[in-house]
Amino acid sequence: MSIKRQDRQDRLLALLGSGTTLAITALARDLDVSDETIRRELRDLEAAGRVERLHGAVRLARRETEGPLDRRLHENVDAKKRIAQAAARFVADGDIIFIDAGTTTFHIAQALRQHTDLTVITNSLGVATALGGINGNRLFLAGGQMDYEYRAFSDRQAQDYVAGFTPHLALLSVGAVSADRGLMDFHAGEATMSRIAYATAGRVLLAADASKFGRYGLMATAPCASVSVLVTDQPLAPDIASAFAHAEVVVTG
């Protein structure tokens, strides 16, 4: 596939990333291409199981979405809280940090409420609420159109805003991890946010409970080699451990 087509398909998935159903004509207008070009891209994405086409419209395939934030916040809570406490120890008072909109990183934000003088960059409303306005912290919240299922901002405006920062440490979640395909996500906007963080942060701490390993996501975000620190709750399988051989691995369980 050409780079141009890949970029077009990535933009298509990003437009559908909020879980909404969009008309094919609207997608063609937003991407400034013909309806037939959009239909061709959608046929490929449908064949790959990424989208579902309706009558004159399209949406992300339901099996490719993670589900509302409220439900995911109640999954594997104990493991996520242990991971959060371990991850918080990698943050020093006064650090400049980026925190993404994942549920595990929301717990990390809660674990950082005793830290002081942090500069926090985030696209997550929950993280902003947890860490903004306390302990001398400075908060930079990406704006744009809110994704209400994620309670986050991850559209192009938010991405451009976050890309302007150079944090000491990015604290990231992940949708799926595979030894052969690397790190993946289910939400196009959040996947792009992750790519930006990997490109701009001095170091990346990945927080992932055991349920994320050995599965595939909708789209790739980064190779495992991009992670500086991995914090998880169970020992890694041999193939996953090999993929993260370069990283500092902390197992909380």
Image (spheres, grey):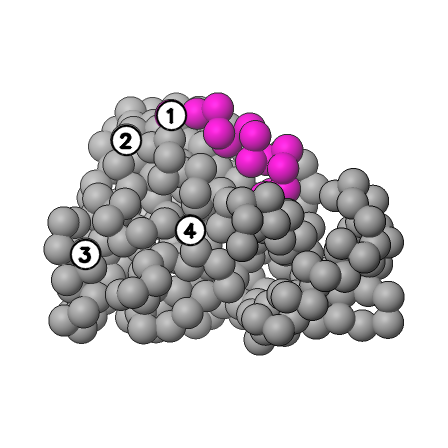
210 vs 181: above or below: below
Say which residue appears at 29% left-offset and 25% top-offset: 94
Say which residue appears at 46% left-offset and 66% top-offset: 217
**Separation of residues labelled 4 and 1 (CA atoms):** 18 Å
Which range of residues does the magenta coloring cover? 153-166
> Magenta span has 155?
yes
Which quarter shows the C terminus? bottom left
**Separation of residues labelled 2 and 4 (CA atoms):** 17 Å
**Badge 1 or badge 2: first in the primary sequence:** 1
**Badge 2 or badge 4: first in the primary sequence:** 2
Tell me, yes or no, whether the two marked residues, 1 and 3, touch with CB atoms within 8 Å: no
Say which residue appears at 33% left-offset and 59% top-offset: 182
Q: Which mark is residue 221?
A: 4
Of tags 2 and 4, the one toward the viewer is 4
User: Which residue position is annotated with label 2?
Assistant: 202
**Badge 2 or badge 3: first in the primary sequence:** 2
Say which residue appears at 32% left-offset and 73% top-offset: 214
Which quarter shows the N terminus? bottom right
Of tags 2 and 3, the one toward the viewer is 3
- Going by the numbered disc 2, the residue's amino acid type is Gly
- Going by the numbered disc 4, the residue's amino acid type is Thr
- Name the side, left or right, on which 155 lies relative to 192: right
Q: Which mark is residue 56?
A: none
- Secondary structure under the numbered disc 1 in the rendered image: loop
- Going by the numbered disc 1, the residue's amino acid type is Thr
Where residue 93 sits, quadrant-wise, is top left
Q: Is residue 124 visible?
A: no
Q: Residues within 10 Å of mark 2 (few under 14, many from 20)?
A: some
- Name the side, left or right, on which 151 lies relative to 53: left
